[in-house]
Image: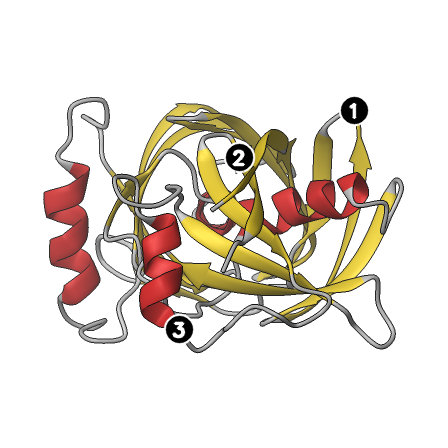
Amino acid sequence: MQQTFYKYQGTGNDFVMIDNRKESFNKKDTKHIAYLCDRRFGIGADGLILLENHPKLDFKMVYYNADGNESTMCGNGGRCLVAFAKQLGIVTDRAAFEAIDGLHRAEIENGIVKLQMQDVTTIEKHEKHVFLNTGSPHHVQFEEHIEDFDIKTKGAQIRYGAPYNEAGSNVNFVKKISDATFAVRTYERGVEDETLSCGTGVTAVALAMSYLGETNQNLVTLQTQGGNLRVSFAKEGDSYNNVCLIGPATFVYKGVI
């Protein structure tokens, strides 16, 4: 069976996109999804995303990690899906869609997608890290020597260690550049390695830095290995609303496998 797909990337975080509005894709075949994401034997991607019909909104997002399992929200994937929906003619400059964590609204202009993320009302402060959920769970900690830090080894230790254990957490290492700029490197569960960028991860970092008093700004730039993203938000006490992830979403190529 032939499968038409589209490849997108957002600051190096890459995805296989499939138009599943006719519901022809086998969503239960985790091995096949993992194969499509495999960089040596398949197409190669950090995840696979299905665009599906929604009864009231523009479309529905179904996201799978590279290991083939359906996962929690992916911010860069959501941004890329908006660009994909525009390419398909489903939306023009605005979109509203449902993901696993609920409703998202977005705007797209000149290849830049501004995606509204979920409100965050709970942030856990620990001795050496902060934990919060921005649609996906994220551990955030400082690392001064971020440039040559062994992200995969240290990230895996934290991801599989207590208190996360089997459920796991994404792990973000952060270095402060200025009051409104932070360098971020992320180990993603499901990929089980560092990704060049993580949308929910940089969102978590921006809110964590505000929560810790490391920034007084409500628009923060996050420098990832794949490029810069921005996160804007409104703070009310220790809660955050009107949270938006902003950055490029780029069509790479279309193919048949």
Between circles 3 and 1, the one closer to the viewer is 3
Under circle 3, the secondary element is loop
Q: Which one is nearer the viewer's eye here, 50 or 42?
A: 42
| Cβ atoms under marks 2 and 3 closer than 8 Å | no
Mark pair 1, 2: CA separation: 15 Å
Observer-side mark, 2 or 3, equals 3
Q: CA distance from mark 3 to mark 1?
A: 36 Å
Q: Quadrant of residue 52?
A: bottom right
Within-10-Å neighbours for mark 1: few <14, some 14–19, many 20+: few
Please, is residue 34 above or below residue 111 in the view?
below
Residue sitting at x 47%, y 46%:
257
Residue 126 x, y percent position in the rendering? 27, 62
| Residue 33 position (above or below residue 174) | below
Front in this rendered view, residue 103 or 257: 257
Residue at 31 percent across and 67 percent down: it is: 31
Examine the rendering and report whether any part of residue 131 can be seen. no
In primary-sequence order, the first of circles 1 and 2 is 2
Q: Which residue is mark 2?
A: 9
Question: Which of marks 3 and 2 precedes in the sequence?
Answer: 2
Amino acid carrying label 2: it is Gln
Query: From the viewer's perspective, is 142 left or right of 101?
Result: left
Confirm whether residue 223 shows in the render.
Answer: yes
Q: How is the image coloured?
A: secondary structure
What residue does disc 1 label?
A: 110
Q: Left or right: 28 with respect to 229?
A: left
Q: Which residue is mark 3?
A: 29
Circle 2 SS class: strand
Question: As drawn, is 190 to the left or to the right of 1?
Answer: left
Q: Which mark is residue 157?
A: none
Question: Which comes before the other along the chain, label 3 or label 1?
Answer: 3
Please, what is the three-letter code of the amino acid marked with disc 1?
Asn
